[in-house]
Amino acid sequence: MVNLINYLLQFGQLNQQQIDLIKSKAKVIELKKEDYFSEAGKIARQVAFVDDGILRVCYYNNKGEEITRYFIDENNFAVDLNSFSYQIPSSEYVQAVTDCKLFVFSADALKDLSVTIIAWDSIINAITAKSLIEKVNRISPMLAEDAKARYISFLDKFPQLANRIPLSLLASYLGITQSSLSRIRKNIR
Amino acid sequence: MVNLINYLLQFGQLNQQQIDLIKSKAKVIELKKEDYFSEAGKIARQVAFVDDGILRVCYYNNKGEEITRYFIDENNFAVDLNSFSYQIPSSEYVQAVTDCKLFVFSADALKDLSVTIIAWDSIINAITAKSLIEKVNRISPMLAEDAKARYISFLDKFPQLANRIPLSLLASYLGITQSSLSRIRKNIR
DNA sequence: GACAATATTTGCCAAATGGCAAAAAGTGAA
DNA sequence: TTCACTTTTTGCCATTTGGCAAATATTGTC
């Protein structure tokens, strides 16, 4: 779990005892491609750290189309904060895009860590704020770009991701149709 | 400052002494339409609570076009978290769309409140998380919608805002041209 | 390799949106 | 009211994107 620990250490100090405690609270979960980590309608009761693989967060709009909101790759946390924080039913799915290895914390485990480790809340708040800011900064400029620019920006920011994600999912993430994305790719070459 | 205090009380408990302290740390600022609260290139050193009026956050893209990222209306905090949290130069402007009355806290004032009021950090973290989640939830679905649907969603979520904001700014927020928005409005009537 | 299943590309045309400039409407000051 | 200024609407046409279906390419399995 070296990646997880290193990730946490970016946001605050932890001694060896605390690190061991954190490790003991994490559960390893392996997901096969297209397995769900959490589902709409259910209350999110776990937080996942992606050690290997790619997750995506998606939902169905009022036309029944499946929309990918974002991807979560290695060394990032995945959680439906809306659902987890307020214990309300989730409105989105978290699904494995590739086979995944996750470190999972239950709400109870997090509670234990929060009361035992002084710096825990501060670390979690910093991670929460940072990842939400990143989401806003990533999505927000896309609105002002046309499809081609969005795709190029994606390649630029996540060069290693494009070839690991099916075209259909990437298109839905970019807010365009699969055909359009295919044509855009042809144009760029 | 009743609106500010009521807003804070939604996120945690405060006694009268603490409330008085908070009030004493807030500075009232009035902005005229088009005045800037903060500017790109400078480090954000203040946090504003909008008591009256509308702010907008905007930036210039690589084509030199001015893009409105979002609007902040009454009873919301405005801050460039990227810049304020990490003390790095801001990449965006915060500007008054209408005349505004703001309650402003300096970084020092916030620091004082943090060390004096036990619940302060928890309140601020809750506000931060909630407002960022709202931003993500608001922007994210827009990518999957066409221009007309985006405008209708905006009217739906912010019915009182549309008539207070110039068409050009709203169009840039929606990621479309002013002409297109004008045509969409005509179609809807 | 052969096959089936899945993923991607392409063609065709319709619809949506952009770019630009001019016209029209709205606003505020004298 | 009139004038100047700003904002919004409109016309015209080019470009982008969508919708749908068929063709092609890729992948995994036997």
Image (cartoon, coloured by chain):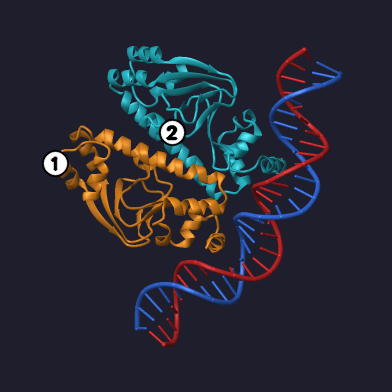
Chain colours: A cyan, B orange, C blue, D red
Whole-percent x, y for residue B114 in the image: 23, 35
> Mark 2 to mark 1: distance in Å?
35 Å
Quarter of the image where the C terminus of chain A is located: top right
- Please tell me which residue is depicted at 37% across the width and 45% down the height of the picture: B80
- Asked whether B100 or B164 is in front, the reply is B164
Identify the residue at the far left of this view: B17
Q: Check the residue under mark 2 and report the chain it is in.
A: A
In the rendered structure, the answer to whether residue C12 lies left or right of residue B117 reads right
Same chain, labels 2 and 1: no
Pinpoint the chain carrying mark 1.
Answer: B
Q: Which residue is mark 1?
A: B16
Q: Amino acid at mark 1?
A: Gln
Assess disc 2: are there few (<14), some (14-19) or many (≥20) residues with their C-alpha within 10 Å of its C-alpha: some
Report the residue at 32% width, 52% height from top.
B74
Describe residue A86's horizontal placement relative to residue C4 as left or right.
left
Residue A176 locus on image (x, y percent) = 62, 43
A99 to B181, vertically: above or below: above
Q: Which residue is identified by label 2? A: A131
Identify the image quadrant of residue B106. top left
From the viewer's perspective, is residue B86 above or below residue B152? above
Residue A106 image-quadrant placement: top left
Q: How many marks?
A: 2
Quarter-of-image position of residue A148: top right
Which SS class for mark 1?
helix
In depth, the one of C4 and A128 nearer the eye is: C4
* Labelled pair 2, 1 in contact (Cβ < 8 Å): no
Q: Position of residue B23 (x, y in %)?
A: 18, 47
